Image (cartoon, grey):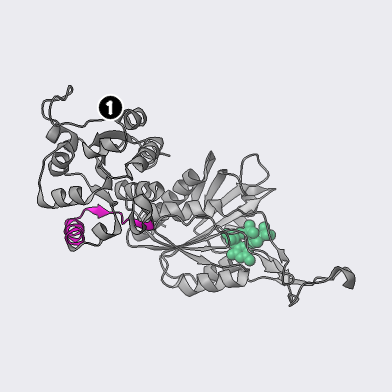
Amino acid sequence: MSGPLEGRRVVLGVTGGIAAYKAIDVCRRLVDAGAHVVPIMTEAAQHFVGTTTLGALASEPVQTELWRNPTTPIPHTVVGQGADLILVAPATAKLLSAYRTGFSHDLLTNTLLATRAPVVVCPAMHTEMWEHPSVVDNVAVLRERGVHVVDPESGRLAGGDVGAGRLADPSVIVAEVERVLGPGDLDGTTVVVTAGGTREPIDAVRVIANRSSGKQGYAVAAEAAARGAHVVLVSTVELAAPVGVEVVAVETAEEMRDAVTQRRATSDVVVMAAAVADFRPVAAAGGKIKKDDGVPEIVLEATPDILRGLGEDKPDGQVLVGFAAETDDLRANALAKLTRKNLDLIVANDVGAPHVGFSHDTNAVTLLRPDADPVEIDLASKREIARAVINTIVEIRAASRTGEL
Ligand code: CTP
């Protein structure tokens, strides 16, 4: 189950800004994701970080020059022609200007002109420079030409200034590279994902909760966004929002139901990865229940079954996905839920098995569909599980379009 960067040739161009040190982290993440990273540094970049550091982490030695290249007499075209993607991080105002006008004065600018691969640039500079009309204009022209621009963040800049212009976080940069190199098979779709365990209030300070960490739902949301979907993540937990994902914070089953049902009509896919409480106190005490008042009797009632409600009134072509966390009779229980809730797919996990389910970073699941053989996914990272889930969703959508279902 390889990701979109596996075996892809990514040229990483580093230009001369203080954020050049973050390019090291970007490089490491790209290599970890399976990319072959070809590093190029401009002369100015070498004032900020050394070629030894970047070269040690990249897939080959750093190239810096148009001349005296030991591997090829024509580096100005060879590097760009062989690339699957060119990433420039950080990109200075000078680089943006040169790229816009075609001023090819060094190896990186030549490479940018010679390539036909997609290009991602990540500007970083002081706020005054970022907001200067010439930079604004250069960025707009590059965008128009199809260059992917990862906007800088606001934050502390070199010299202690604060403002827009700080290089985007390495995780954001790598997510954009993954999206650009990914299959784009959810382009133009809207995907709603729920994540985390709901919390049902007992009184002003106490809740009925469960062990769900939300990690699997977040991984599904991140993967769907990487595949091109507009993703709304309805979440009860406060993990870092995946790149490009809209997060809607909720707490109770009822709030989750409202957030999901509001969006159901316009969603192509709904993935209920959340662990929704089945029961809640009939009435939560307004204040804190005091110990001296004796042991309270808490009367429970059923919460709405969100997924069942969605399945009862499913728009044509919508793919509805449930999760089933089981401790016994995994397949039988999950299949019963698949039918009862009118789902297209259920992701069943045996939460009693080691390293599986709640709070772990890994999972192992069985994917069950109404008219297809079960598929076992062995222990893997939650992102890899998410990839398998999204692959199956894409398959279901393709099959329903060609009438195979
Ligand atoms: N679910 C839901 N609303 C609920 C309970 C569950 O939408 N009130 C969804 C979950 O998000 C999950 C699926 O239904 O995708 C299955 O949840 P699970 O708790 O395994 O099943 P239940 O139907 O609650 O059955 P049981 O607790 O008896 O196993």
Q: Is 144 a magenta residue?
A: yes
- Give the x, y percent position of residue 367: 52, 48
From the viewer's perspective, is residue 149 above or below residue 292?
above
Q: Does the residue labelled 1 lie within 8 Å of ligand 1?
A: no
Q: Quadrant of ligand 1?
A: bottom right
In the rendered image, which quarter is residue 152 located in?
A: bottom left
What count of labels does the image hold?
A: 1
Q: Residue at x 16, y 56 (%)?
A: 145
Q: In which quarter of the image is residue 378?
A: top right
Q: In the picture, which quadrant includes the C terminus?
A: bottom left
* Secondary structure state at the residue bearing disc 1: loop
* Residue 105, magenta (yes or no): no
159 displayed left or right of 248: left
Res. 134 in view: yes
Q: Is residue 192 above or below residue 108?
A: below
Amino acid type, residue under disc 1 in the picture: Pro
| Residue count near mark 1 (Cα–Cα under 10 Å), binned few <14, some 14–19, many ≥20 | some
Over which residues does the magenta segment extend? 134-155
Disc 1 target residue: 61
- The x, y position of residue 335, in whole percent, is 59, 54
Between residues 153 and 111, which one lies in front from this camera angle?
Answer: 153
Question: For residue 22, which quarter of the picture?
Answer: top left
Q: Which of 22 and 386 is in front in this view?
A: 22
